[in-house]
């Protein structure tokens, strides 16, 4: 069974949790090959449960970046609909409350808790956005949490 989490946005991420070996794969939302994981020969016949954030969080400092966020969100929804892939769209608060052991107060504290949870849960996953990145990719950690949320909602939770 595959569980997919999508965190759309400017640096959005896709996380694919394979229940057979509890492995986590992450990729950029702009990399359409990541979104086509279910067409791969080795996993094409598996059932997929997908969860994604309700809508892009409007944090952009200019209109063009905000427009790009909503464009990507629409493209993702269109792709999923065209492929007839069922999805659950939820608010960040909903998956955070379900996945994180304790939900801290404050946005920065929640981000830190999500990073610590994801990197601790899948320590072998490369959580950097690029080879040159120095910091952990927050959107990938959020997408991984969404994939875990999809697993919990499908009845396969840990």
Image: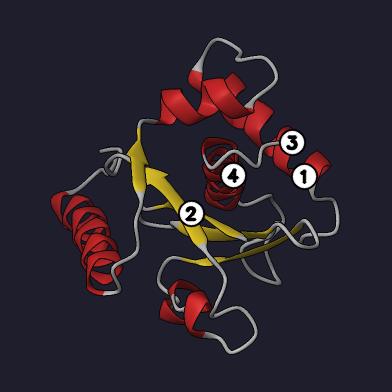
Q: Residue furthest bottom?
A: 41
Q: What residue is rendered at 52% in x and 76% in y? A: 37
Q: Closer to the N terminus: mark 1 or mark 2?
A: 2
Where does the image place residue 55, in percent across and percent down from the top left? 27, 42
Residue 17 lies, with reference to residue 38, above or below; the image says above
Give the camera-side residue of 39 and 70: 39
Give the camera-side residue of 62 and 110: 110
- Residue where numbered disc 4 is placed: 151
Where does the image place residue 59, in percent across and percent down from the top left? 30, 38
Per the model, the C-alpha gap separating discs 4 and 2 is: 7 Å
- Residue where numbered disc 2 is placed: 49
Where does the image place residue 61, in percent across and percent down from the top left? 25, 43
Secondary structure at badge 1 equals helix
Q: Closer to the N terminus: mark 3 or mark 4?
A: 4
Q: Are marks 3 and 1 in contact (CB under 8 Å)?
A: no
Regarding residue 141, the answer to whether it shows in the image is: yes
Secondary structure at badge 4 equals helix
Q: What residue is rendered at 67% in x and 14% in y? A: 102
> Quarter holding the C terminus?
top right
Per the model, the C-alpha gap separating discs 3 and 2 is: 15 Å
Q: Closer to the N terminus: mark 3 or mark 2?
A: 2
Q: Are marks 3 and 4 in contact (CB under 8 Å)?
A: yes
Q: Closer to the N terminus: mark 4 or mark 2?
A: 2
Secondary structure at badge 2 equals strand
> For the residues carrying marks 1 and 2, which lies nearer the camera in this image?
2
Left or right: 69 in relation to 110: left
In the image, which disc is placed on residue 158? Answer: 3
């Amino acid at each position: 069974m595959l569980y997919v989490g999508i965190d759309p946005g400017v640096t959005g991420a896709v996380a694919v949790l394979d229940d057979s070996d509890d492995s986590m794969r992450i990729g950029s939302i702009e990399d359409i090959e990541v979104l086509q994981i279910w067409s791969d020969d080795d996993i094409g016949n598996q059932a997929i449960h997908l969860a994604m954030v309700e809508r892009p969080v409007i944090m952009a400092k200019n209109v063009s970046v905000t427009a790009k966020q909503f464009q990507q969100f629409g493209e993702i929804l269109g792709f999923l609909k065209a492929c007839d892939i069922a999805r659950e769209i939820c608010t960040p608060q909903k998956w955070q409350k379900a996945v994180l052991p304790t939900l801290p107060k404050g946005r920065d504290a929640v981000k830190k808790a999500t990073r610590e949870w994801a990197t601790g849960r899948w320590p072998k996953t490369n959580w950097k956005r690029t080879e040159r990145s120095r910091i952990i990719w927050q959107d990938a950690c959020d997408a991984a949490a969404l994939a875990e949320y999809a697993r919990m909602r499908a009845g396969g939770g840990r």
